[in-house]
Amino acid sequence: MPTGVATMIYALGILGLFWLDRDPKARTSAALWVPSVWLVLAGSRSVAQWLLVGQPMARYSPDLLEEGSPIDRLVYTSLLVVGLIVLASRSRQVGKLLRANGPTLVFFLYCAMSLLWSDYPDVGFKRWTKALGDLVMVLVVLSEREPFAAVRRLLARTAFLLIPVSILFIKYYPELGKGYGVWDWKAVYTGVTTNKNTLGVICLFLGLGSVWRLLTAFTCQEDTGRTRQMIAHGAVLAMVLWLFWIANSMTSFSSFFLGSAVLTLTNFRGIIRRPAVVHVLVAAIVCGSIAVLFLGMAPGVLSTIGRDPTLTDRTGIWSVVIDLTSNPFVGTGFESFWLGPRLPKIWSLYRWQPLEAHNGYIEVYVNLGWTGVTLLAVVIATGYRTVVAAWRRNPQVGSLMLTYFVVGLVYNFTEAAFFRMMAPAWILFLLAITCVPELPFARSEDQAKSLDMPFVPTWQQAETTLSEEII
């Protein structure tokens, strides 16, 4: 098929997905497009890379990593400013959100403070600004009049754009969606991203979003366009599975399998009536993953997902980067470890030039030290209470938040996604753990009818004692 014809067909297909998923009753503002654009860029390529599309990709160098791109800086700063203006216009709601999420704010503030002892404070500040943008975009979404509808639309818009275009690039524009390994010259499929791991990440989290929408539509009692929605998200799910197969991103695919299981189980009525089962389920997944990945149990599982006992050289990188950490207590400073003389030392050992520790917890340690790891542990603990409380109040919404939380924990065992600026895994993990103190959902079925909106119990209440909700 000629590329022009294929492009037209895919464009019509994308418009068809938006049409099938339409929901006229969902009330979201135009401001939701700001985080939508942010997430699309985070899940694909930077603006500078899109402008250079079709040209040879520049190799990473220490100088390039420090300088960054002026074009990207302009676009991301503009989006951040617009997002801050939106939040300023919603100061009352945003104030409640900030007060309800103290541990996350403390973690962000500590990252900013760590620039005081960084060797590259100017570079670190630019990156911290991007990381702040992730938080701003999450707050824009959750301060919408209907946060539930905003989350649905955010995930749908991103999936409808990135997933089909990735297939279009791979099949009809191989110079854009396909590359070759630098050392072995094997085909590597990247889609709209720049590497197969990022393609796996967007398939993982957006695919789970479509699984969630399918489960929601299937269990919906009223026929409010659920057939259309099931067709749209069934198509997205089929495309995601094809991309998993061709990209061979086994870390993301195995996480997708675990996440789908969590989504399905937490929507069972029997489990909803027994909240303690959820704690057992989460503990089993996390502990089981640790046993397989780090303790050498069930080695057949590792071979099945294409991993060896070194997790494809990851364990070697971990020991190297830990030895190069100068201050174990406070680290090297936010996003400063992979800069300066440490980078050539690591690249001299690994010719594929790693730019991360391939473990989110170690990545936090080398940049922020044990202090950062401790603060991250507090964020995770409070985040877990938040997602469980959300699930108990509204299993339909809370099941997705719980799934993103569990997948985020497991995914960071072999990839670095915690607090990585403009990383889809971190943005959606942050979205999941952010506590929403008040939601404008109808409190009763009678009120729902009077407001002409579906009845959904309150998602989260910050004033409620969350510990009592979990027991």
Image: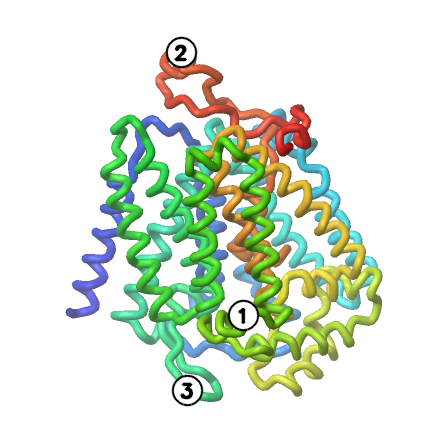
Badge count: 3
**Residue 82: x, y in percent?**
54, 41
Figure quadrant of residue 276 = top right
Question: Relative to 302, is 212 on the left or the right?
Answer: left
Residue at mark 1: 298
Residue at mark 2: 446
CA gap, disc 1 to disc 2?
53 Å
CA gap, disc 2 to disc 3?
63 Å
Amino acid under disc 2: Asp
Q: In the image, is residue 58 above or below residue 38?
A: below
Label 2: element kind = helix
CB under 8 Å between callouts 1 and 3? no
N-term mark: 2 or 3: 3
**Residue 395: x, y in percent?**
47, 34
Q: Quadrant of the C terminus?
A: top right
N-term mark: 1 or 3: 3
Figure quadrant of residue 289 = bottom right
Query: At 58% from the left edge and 46% from the top edge, which residue is drawn?
Result: 280
Res. 72 visible in picture: yes
Question: Relative to 177, is 120 on the left or the right?
Answer: right
Query: At 23% from the left edge and 57% from the top edge, which residue is drawn?
Result: 10
Label 3: element kind = loop
